[in-house]
Amino acid sequence: MEKTRKIRRVLRSKPTLEGAGVHLNRAFGFSEPRSFDPFLLLDDFRSDIQEDYIKGFPWHPHRGIETITYMLTGKVEHGDSMGNSGVIDPGDVQWMTAGSGIIHQEMPKGDLYGRMGGFQLWANLPAIQKMMEPRYREVKSSQIPVVNVAGGVSVRVISGEVDGTRGPVRDIITDPEYLDVSLPAGVEYRHPTKTDHTVLAYVIEGQVYYDPEKKTGAANRDLVQFEAGEQVVACAPEAPARFLLISGKPIGEPVAWYGPIVMNTEEELQIAFDEYRNGTFIKHKKVDYRK
């Protein structure tokens, strides 16, 4: 019988101000970067108030990480130093590997009712790939498969695999799994996990229990970190619920992190910021991106 992962802890996301003045909730990323290895940060930027998000995230650099943006409501207009530009619509995913360095901007826009919402996850890169060539993947909602599991459970598979169906984002260094799980009331959902992976769940609707005794519930904007094991078991006994299930292979390396740049040593961090100041930060082919 597969060993069910026990809850290590439940963390309440905290209000945070980022970018040019965007109000969001940070599930993790304030400290303890090794605790969530290979992940560094998870931000929840859902809001019905335009003033909370409209100033957005103007041009800024990244190096040494991947940023994964998943939209639920509204849209984000983006552009970067590789010449990519476009719009991330509801249900879309932007998976950006900063690698050796990229400069980009992300400007949120609300829907007709002023609602905007989604999530950004940061995944670390191992030292050998810190300075890899940057790459950009835009995955449209229609490209993300939905797997209907027994009992009425519905799973959007962004990366990873559910019942033989693989998500469109593949060949990622930390072997991540990123699922959007919708649970009907009273139905138990079991999902196998790789024993050596870090596994997290972030509740975005309702209340979910991940323990057989149903003593510890996680509500909207709660993050659950799991102990080691071979599967996650989830149930919403009282009302329908929805959560993100995220896992990845730990890197196990030192983390030197300041703002949008994550390296392995303080010296590498200093080099990155010196290069940004003197105009040598971008290693890929330069284009006229600030149009």
Image (cartoon, helix red, strand yellow):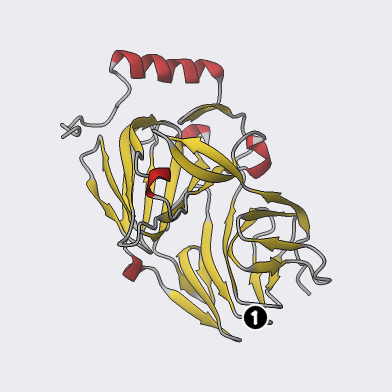
Q: Is residue 188 above or below residue 100?
A: below
Residue in view at x 55 percent, y 18 percent: 266
Label total for image: 1
Confirm whether residue 199 shows in the render. Answer: no
Residue in view at x 40 percent, y 35 percent: 99
Picture quarter containing residue 133? Answer: top left
Q: Is residue 70 above or below residue 257?
A: below
At label 1, the amino acid type is Ala
Residue 45 screen position, x and y as percent: 47, 49
Relative depth, front residue between 278 and 229: 278
Residue 184 screen position, x and y as percent: 60, 80
Residue 230 screen position, x and y as percent: 71, 64
Q: Is residue 172 left or right of residue 33?
A: left
Location of the N terminus by quadrant is bottom right
Relative depth, front residue between 221 and 257: 221
Residue in view at x 51 percent, y 60 percent: 178
Relative depth, front residue between 241 and 138: 241
Residue behind mark 1:
185
Picture quarter containing residue 222? Answer: bottom right
Residue in view at x 29 percent, y 26 percent: 282
Q: Is residue 69 left or right of residue 290?
A: right
Q: Is residue 284 above or below residue 117?
A: above
Dot 1 surroundings within 10 Å: few (below 14), some, or many (20 or more)?
Answer: some
Picture quarter containing residue 207? Answer: bottom right
Classify mark 1: helix, strand or loop: loop
